[in-house]
Image: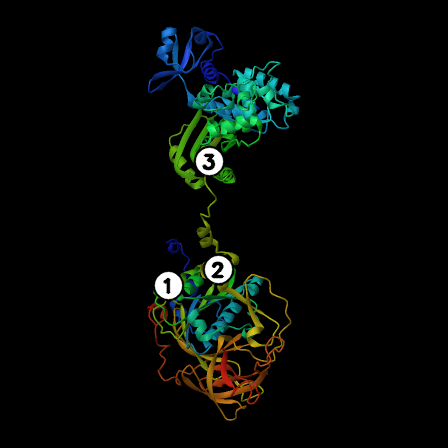
Amino acid sequence: MAIWLMDLALDRWRQVNRLARGEGADAAPLALISDTAHGPRIDAVNPAARAAGAAAGMRLADARALCPALAAVPSDPAGDLACLEKLALWAQRWGPWSALDPPDGLLVDTTGASHLFGGEARLLADLAAAFGQRGFAARAALAPTAGAAWALAHFAAHSRAQPAILAPGDDPMRLLGDLPVAALRLDGDVITVLRRLGLKRIGDLVGLGEGGDPAAARDALQRRFRNRKSPAANPLIRLDQLLGLVPEPLLPVVAQPMPLVQRQVTEPIRHRALLDRVLADLAADLQRELAARGSGARRVELLLWRVDGEVIMRRLELAAATRDPAHLIGLLAAKLDGIDAGFGIETLRLCASWCEPLHAAQADIEAAAEAHGTTLAGCLDRLAVRLGAGAVTRPVPHPSHWPERAQRWQAPLESEPASQGMLNFHQRPLKLLDKPESIAVLYAAPDGSPQRFRWRGQVRDVVRVEGPERIAPEWWRERSTARLRDYYRIEDSCGARYWIYRHGLVGDGRGGAPLWFLHGLYA
Amino acid sequence: MSRFSPSLPVPSVASSYPGGARRAAARWRPGLASQPLHSEIFAPGHQACGAGLALALARDALKAAADSADAARRHVLWVQDRAAIRLGGRPYLHGLPADLRYRVIHVATTSPEDALFAMEEVLKCRDLACVIGEVAGNPRTLDFTASRRLSLAAERAGIALWLVRLDAAPDLSSARMRWRAAAAPSLPPRWNPTAPGAGRWHAELFRARAHLPGEWMLSDDAGALRAERVSPLAASPPDHGDLAYGSGARSLAAG
């Protein structure tokens, strides 16, 4: 549905000056003007001025020549746009969302909503009555596409021959074909070009005139406007939008209610300490309110209602968006010095009239960690971020008797895999080298216990030995040539104890003379 | 830096040990209730006696300070840098004491800086039993400032840190207790006299804020720390421990 507010600027001017239509200053010729490089230009004129010959778009001097009594009032386009935004939100009573169509139109999506008003005709009547009550002259039209609705709202006669409603089943060209090409929302220069080409009506564009060929007409327009990409400059795009052949995205207006928190106190506040206390509560409420919508306040207004009806207002502007209650209270407290509480303050309101997006930040994670300590998971996360995920691990048993394979490393907080209880027949070393280190061993017999060994360049005497503990390779995992290990627990002359093994046996047919390795260190 | 705020609860000697400096000159013994929270153990890199002693002391301290039912399930963080892993290997699940076996979380770092970061970071965590660190040599980053940071972090969190220094010279440090450990001939086993027995360590407490220096033969007897004084007469340098002032009066910075 498209709504055209025909006299938006003048209607607003009348409302600002509390005038009814055609009375008071409005009875005399009047024009709203804006200053341009070539002098004041008329934006809108009232009916009296129009009768005297003035029209929108004229220079004020020309209009004054026609009508010397013409009064000039500066127009307010920014105020008109703000009013249009408010009206767009208000127009959501007829449909779930609405869009602005500046400078003086609205588009409302009423799909599936008209039955709530008793049909489309009644919806339009309701709309006309509602806008009439608010003092706006409005024309509205309903159509399946925004372009068609706009054309009907602006250019249809709204008579029996040209109704304001285009039903989905109707042939659009039957209703729209007679409308001028300006109904396509084209730029002024394009309309001029089309007029010079003799294409005055929409029907002419699609080749519906006498002796026209639709394909040839479209082809000719395509060639004429082939380098115009903007919809407002290319009548074919506008035509397709009108017919619903190409989509036309619209930017909906969404209401952003101002974050506002309020407290009413049963006993009027007369002392500053209490006021600060309530203010702290309000600031905490405002923080929750702002955090919920992911924004921070740039401007905060504090309103205090006194018992005797006075309203005290304090305004605070912030350099950057914030919602930190301590920061807000600290700044507001400085503004509250010397406040006159009178007989007491009964209502307090804090509102953030200007907000900016402020994403949730972990501002105090360090402070919280300093004060209470981190959780284990948080601590491990920090470690993993700096050291890499594989650096923080936890040993878990694995069903294997092969020493390296009997323990696995997994992520620290994962649950432990199910495992059999361990049989503590043998003492295992406290620490295991990542890779067994080769040692040179002096022994009495090739398959006997070691007597002396050299490791990392130092010769150590073996004082005590226990072993061997023979650990056979896992044939279901290893190749058949894998050698067994004979492990010895040994202690050297200074008391250090090691876990060493002989890799293989003499004459096992799986390699040469067996080598010795040091694998673990006992505590 | 906020961590050096004046409200930092650093327990002074006098507050931790009622009785003041006189009382503070007491000998260290196993099972003391209030153990200092940052200790260093200097050990040779080719033995696992440093880690063994650290574990034994940690278990002793945990047993003395078992405050809640939750304490037996808290994790033990074991931080090693790459050089320490290369020297002494990683902890082996089946060789760890049974009560700690399933509570160890291992942190392997590539550099001593990362190991210091990891130790300081885990000391901020409230859900830990203790932290064992192993750093090899005397890295430039492990200076007095770094050790002081570790001491403050440990005291703030109330979590004990046992820092094993492999093949390191005792340089400046703010550790509250500094041990020098070496392997000692093991206890004779019950059945096989030719086999190595349970481990025993020759531990020398050479700097402590609250205790006199001394030497002990320490061993871990199924979770209980057994200490045996090494006779001062047997040691070649005379031990003037009983004649010296309480060590709390002296600078502890230099080893």
Give the side of residue A301 with respect to residue A417, left or right: left
Q: Nearer the viewer, residue A221 or A232?
A: A221
Q: Nearer the viewer, mark 2 or mark 3?
A: 2
Same-chain status of marks 2 and 3:
yes
Q: Which residue is mark 1?
A: B146
Query: CB atoms at circles 2 and 3 under 8 Å apart?
Result: no
Q: Which residue is mark 2?
A: A384
Give, as a three-letter code, the residue at label 1.
Ala
In the rendered image, residue B201, in percent from the top left (x then y), is placed at 46, 79
Within 10 Å of disc 1 (Cα), the crowding (few <14, some 14-19, many 20+) is some
Give the label on residue A279, or none.
3
Same-chain status of marks 1 and 2:
no
Judging from the image, mark 1 belongs to the subunit labelled: B
Query: In terms of image quadrants, where is residue B138?
Result: bottom left
Give the label on residue B16, or none.
none
Give the side of residue A129 with respect to residue A103, left or right: right
Q: Nearer the viewer, residue B31 or B125?
A: B125
Q: Nearer the viewer, mark 1 or mark 2?
A: 2
Query: In terms of image quadrants, where is residue B16?
Result: bottom left
In the rendered image, residue A180, in percent from the top left (x then y), is placed at 52, 18
Judging from the image, mark 2 belongs to the subunit labelled: A
